Image (tube, coloured by chain):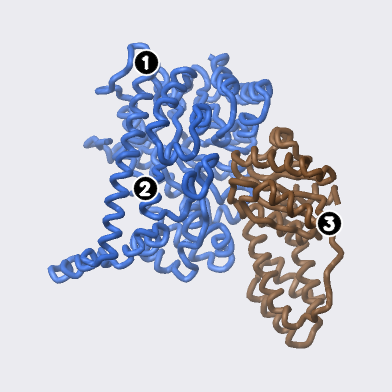
Chain colours: A blue, B brown
């Protein structure tokens, strides 16, 4: 929980960010396994903080996204990832202790029971419709119809509650019967607003929520226990909230890729208005979430603005202005944006360079890193871009050479993280060790 | 040929393209001429995509316009065969365990407008289903799509299943966001590509 100091409004974004980092860096009240674990934790966290604040690090930070590999290596599968969270705990702790990574590597688990209870529609998962060899996959659909744009633009939160939620959770379909909440004011409104809660379908939906909440508590307690144990053993975690570009909120799960792409021609003004309507809601929602969790950064996986998805003109018109507005809104609150650029942004680098210095960390997947180096310079923290294919199927020698090239390229950069372009399920211990060791020769 | 219709399609003026189509058909024009214009327009859109002048919104909208225009011409078309000579048959699909369809649909569409007969098996396709489709159709090219890194093993299994079934003369191309030469080598496929343009050039080199 982050508490604002009295002089908050008079601080610059950088000063606000520094205060959030101070709170995150504090080890007050934390228990460590040993003095060595505490020293490691402090050293690793200080290095990460220096990278995020662009103050220079003694060497690059290696952060391989091999969380799912840890599980597969321990003989666990997708069903464990979704349903048997306790089984994930030990292998994660043991792996981190054995490999001593710069930052905690944990298998990200999902609350399968919560999904089952609510009848979640926009994903499928192992143990449900996917085999145990899988984990999760998104299922696109049109959850907002083309003629519902105006309703969304007028009141995004209301639309979310009464249209979107009932459509993406089968158990919450009756939620659409609830009263329009902002009109509850006078004594005459109260009884009417309570009536739907007396109806059997709504009561069943509320019961489903209570049950889901109970299941979510079980899941989150294991996740919390894992995080605490990793910290205690000396491994800090990147502390992030989660958001997406307004256009991706609209395109990924409200309209779907096909529909949103057609909307760019059929109703372009509505697309822009809907993205704009969502900006203040995201800034407020993410700031609240970051305060609650003590997060210092907000991670955005970027989807539909990639080079191959839309033209630069479309990016400048539909994608970037509202994404930038959300990022700037968060930066005003002292929250740095941690942008996971899926696909390539070779044509977007000049545009993203518009962000204020130090406000953002850019994590690249397939963007040309030489261009990144030349165009973005020292303005932002940079992460990426070892190909997942190399980590999964390449030779150790090729992997080492690729990592060394990246570390050479960013040798003088004040904040560089060696990361994969995307997470992998399949690799070998030798690959992981190579990835983690390469950075040490740059100390 | 009506340059108006070609322009309307290539400049993404959907309503106008449909209006011109209806007017021409109503005026008694040969529906095949309308479809020839459509195909020409699609080729221009495809070329622009290959050159980085058109993107996914344009491909999807062009596909949408093509579908609507074909719908309009259907009642006017005689039952007689109008099939063009095809460059070859391609069995295509997203591999087992992966349900991503958007990139697959775009590649299938682009292969189709570039003259291939595409047998689209959909998503989450088992190795055996690929083998069966190749055997039935006598296709000489197989395209395997996969978005996830989890697709590497099913791709490998599909290549092996084709070999085990004695279909040694069938060439396999793989594609997707996380595919490169390392993965091609790992899976035993004959070629790899990251987008529709690459798929077309590979398929044409094999046709």
Question: In this orientation, which residue lies closer to the viewer: B119 or B3?
Answer: B119
- Where is residue A164 drawn, in percent x and y? 40, 61
Question: In this orientation, which residue lies closer to the viewer: A329 or A112?
Answer: A112
Query: Are labels 1 and 3 assigned to the same chain?
Result: no
Residue at image point 55% right, 34% down: A425
> Mark 3: few, some, or many residues within 10 Å (few <14, many ≥20)?
some
Give residue B116's quadrant in the image: bottom right
Q: Quadrant of the N terminus of chain A?
A: top left
> Mark 2: few, some, or many residues within 10 Å (few <14, many ≥20)?
many
Residue at image point 46% right, 38% down: A338
**Dot 2 lies on which element?**
helix
Q: Answer with left or right where residue A133 lies relative to residue B117.
A: left
Chain hosting mark 1: A
In the rendered image, which residue does mark 2 sit on? A114
In the rendered image, which residue does mark 3 sit on? B88
- Where is residue A5 drawn, in percent x and y? 24, 35
In the rendered image, which residue does mark 1 sit on? A37
Q: Are marks 1 and 2 in contact (CB under 8 Å)?
A: no
User: Gap between marks 1 and 2, in whole Å?
Assistant: 35 Å
User: Gap between marks 2 and 3, in whole Å?
Assistant: 48 Å
User: Gap between marks 1 and 3, in whole Å?
Assistant: 63 Å
Give residue A403's quadrant in the image: top right
- The disc placed on residue A141 is none
């Amino acid at each position: 929980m982050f508490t604002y100091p009295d002089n908050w409004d008079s601080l610059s974004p950088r000063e606000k960010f520094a205060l959030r980092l101070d709170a995150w860096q504090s080890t007050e009240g934390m228990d460590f396994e040993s003095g060595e674990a505490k020293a490691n934790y402090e050293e690793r966290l200080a290095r990460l903080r220096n990278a995020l604040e662009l103050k220079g690090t003694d060497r690059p930070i290696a952060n391989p996204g091999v969380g799912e590999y840890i599980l597969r290596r321990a003989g666990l599968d997708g069903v464990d990832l979704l349903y048997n969270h306790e089984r994930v705990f030990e292998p994660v702790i043991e792996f981190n202790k054995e490999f001593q990574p710069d930052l905690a590597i944990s298998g990200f688990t999902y609350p399968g029971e919560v999904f089952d209870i609510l009848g979640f529609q926009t994903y499928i998962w192992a143990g449900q419709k996917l085999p145990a060899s899988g984990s999760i996959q998104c299922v696109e659909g049109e959850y907002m119809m083309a003629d519902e744009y105006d309703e969304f633009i007028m009141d995004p939160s209301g639309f979310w509650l009464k249209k979107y939620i009932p459509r993406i959770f089968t158990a919450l379909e009756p939620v659409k019967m609830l009263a329009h909440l902002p009109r509850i004011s006078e004594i005459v409104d109260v009884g009417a607003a309570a009536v739907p809660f007396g109806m059997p379908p709504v009561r069943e939906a509320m019961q489903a929520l209570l049950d889901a909440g109970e299941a979510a508590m079980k899941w989150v307690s294991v996740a919390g226990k894992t995080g605490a144990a990793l910290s205690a053993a000396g491994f800090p975690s990147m502390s992030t909230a989660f958001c997406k570009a307004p256009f991706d909120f609209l395109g990924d799960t409200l309209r779907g890729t096909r529909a949103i792409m057609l909307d760019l021609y059929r109703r372009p003004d509505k697309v822009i208005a809907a993205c704009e309507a969502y900006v203040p809601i995201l800034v407020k929602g993410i700031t609240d979430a970051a305060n609650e969790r003590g997060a210092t950064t907000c991670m955005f996986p970027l989807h539909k603005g990639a080079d191959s998805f839309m033209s630069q003109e479309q990016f400048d018109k539909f994608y970037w202005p509202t994404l930038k507005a959300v990022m700037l809104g968060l930066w005003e609150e002292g929250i740095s944006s941690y942008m996971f650029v899926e696909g390539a942004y070779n044509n977007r680098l000049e545009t993203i360079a518009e962000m204020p210095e130090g406000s953002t960390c850019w994590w690249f997947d397939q963007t040309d890193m030489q261009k990144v180096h030349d165009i973005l310079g020292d303005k932002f923290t940079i992460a990426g871009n070892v190909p997942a294919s190399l980590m999964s199927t390449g030779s150790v020698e090729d992997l080492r050479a690729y990592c060394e090239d990246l570390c050479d390229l960013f040798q003088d950069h004040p904040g560089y993280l060696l990361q994969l372009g995307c997470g992998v399920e399949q690799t070998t211990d030798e690959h992981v060790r190579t990835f983690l060791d390469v950075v040490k020769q740059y100390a | 040929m009506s340059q108006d219709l070609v322009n309307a399609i290539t400049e993404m003026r959907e309503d106008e393209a449909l209006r011109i189509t209806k007017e021409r058909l109503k005026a008694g024009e040969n529906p095949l001429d309308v479809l020839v214009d459509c195909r020409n327009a699609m080729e221009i859109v495809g070329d622009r995509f290959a050159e980085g002048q058109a993107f996914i919104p344009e491909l999807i909208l062009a596909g949408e316009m093509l579908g609507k225009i074909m719908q309009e011409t259907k009642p006017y078309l005689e039952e007689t065969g109008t099939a063009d000579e095809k460059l070859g048959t391609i069995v295509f699909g997203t591999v087992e365990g992966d349900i991503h369809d958007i990139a697959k649909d775009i590649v299938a569409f682009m292969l189709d407008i570039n003259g291939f007969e595409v047998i689209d098996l959909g998503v989450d396709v088992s190795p055996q289903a690929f083998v069966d489709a190749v055997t039935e159709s006598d296709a000489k090219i197989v395209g395997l799509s996969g978005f996830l890194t989890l697709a590497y093993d099913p791709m490998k299994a599909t290549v092996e299943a084709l070999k085990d079934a004695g279909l040694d003369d069938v060439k396999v191309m793989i594609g997707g966001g996380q595919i490169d030469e390392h993965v091609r080598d790992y899976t035993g496929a004959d070629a790899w590509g990251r987008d529709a343009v690459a798929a077309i050039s590979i398929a044409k080199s094999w046709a």
